[in-house]
Image (cartoon, rainbow, N blue to C red):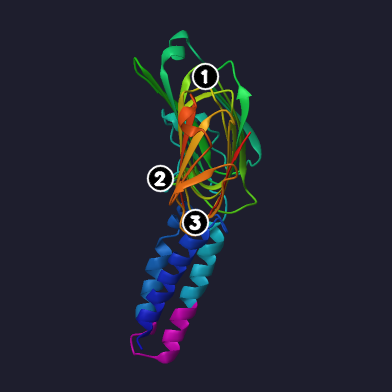
Amino acid sequence: MKFERIVWGVILLFIGGILLLDNLNIIHFYWRNVWHFWPIFLIVGGLNMLFNRNNSQVGSILSLVVVVITLSFLFFKGQENPRNRYFWGGNRNSDNDFNLDIDNERNEGETLTFFEPIVAADTAKKTILNLSGGGTLFELKGNSDSLFYAKVKRRSGRFFLNKNTTDTTNVLTFKMQDKGSRNKSWSFGSGRNNSVELNLSTTPVWYLNLAMGAGKLDFDLSDYKVRTLNFDGGAADVVLKVGKLMPISDINVKTGVANVEISVPETSGCRIKTETGLSNRDFEGFTKISDGVYETPGYKETKQKVFINLNGGLSNFNVSRY
């Protein structure tokens, strides 16, 4: 067997292992730290060519030892907190929404606040909230004088808030991004979890789009006019309490491995449609209409209706009435 293949196999195993451990939140690996040491790979390549010039088994073993030592060094350096947020160094200024966050990731446990004031025109507009984050506890704490208010206890990642508005719609985006990656807004694990306390205005009609890779979400929406709530999550713990202030409310939940508890008003009619695979289902007080369809007694006669769509793999779904 050629030792060159073994060396490249070890390098690929190293990269794949780091990616997997980082995505599972077992370690926190900063590739920007490794990037600064890229000349090491030139040295390793040169040593590999020298040691293997005469097809010496001893030279091949020495080459492999050098690779292992080098990767061990990079594994250690990659877990250090970075001094800047860019691969190429420096601390450039930026006018985008990331400036709402404090950039020093070494300062853990800090408290941040985000808010968007409410104006008179907002009361008549459709209001969309796009919320996403991983390894985070989100709790809805009640009414706010602002359109949106969030108190964040941050231990990892970055948060930002953005508002786009038209004549008929407000779109709020509140997002956590892990370690500066523009596409990574999720993570698994524990130990470095963030917590977010939210306060929303009860005035507008809300359309909620919630995404979470891992974490917990606890929303008491009984005092809010919620037309639609979409939740897309992985290994999450979700608690939702739906109100009766809208004629129709749609609740759509899609999960992987999660615990989902939904409470609906006893005076509202509720229909549940499920595509839950091997998930556990507990729909106390509901009548099975057909395969995957459940309704509350007197569903058709009620004025307020809640439609719940559940889609999950190995999840626990509990829907109850209050």
Residue 150 magenta-drawn?
no
Q: How many marks?
A: 3
- Residue 119 at what x, y percent from top left? 48, 11
Estimate the x, y position of residue 60 in percent, counting from the top left. 42, 85
Residue drawn 43% across and 52% down? 291
- Residue 297 image point, x, y percent: 53, 36
Q: Nearer the viewer, residue 157 or 88?
A: 157
Q: Which residue sits at x=40%, y=76%? A: 9
The kind of secondary structure element at disc 3 is: helix
Closer to us: 166 or 278: 278
Please tell me which of labels 3 and 1 falls first in the chain: 3
Q: Is residue 230 visible?
A: no
Q: Which residues are magenta?
A: 51-65
Q: Residue at x 56, y 62 (%)?
A: 76
How far is disc 3 from disc 1 in space, using C-alphas? 34 Å
Q: Callout 1: few (<14), some (14-19), or many (20+) C-alpha neighbours within 10 Å?
A: many
- Of all residues, the one furthest to the top in this rendering is 120
Q: Residues within 10 Å of mark 3 (few under 14, many from 20)?
A: some
Amino acid, disc 3: Asn
Q: Is residue 136 something one can see in this rendering?
A: yes
Which one is earlier in the sequence, the residue at label 2 or at label 3? 3
Quadrant in the picture for the N terminus: bottom left
Name above or below for residue 16 compared with residue 65: above
Of pointers 1 and 2, the one earlier in the residue sequence = 1
Q: Which mark is residue 147?
A: 1
> Which corner quadrant holds the C terminus?
top right
Kindly report which numbered mark, 1 or 2, lies closer to the viewer in this rendering.
Answer: 1
Instruction: Give residue 53's quadrant in the image.
Output: bottom left
Q: Which element type, helix, strand or loop, lies under badge 1?
A: loop
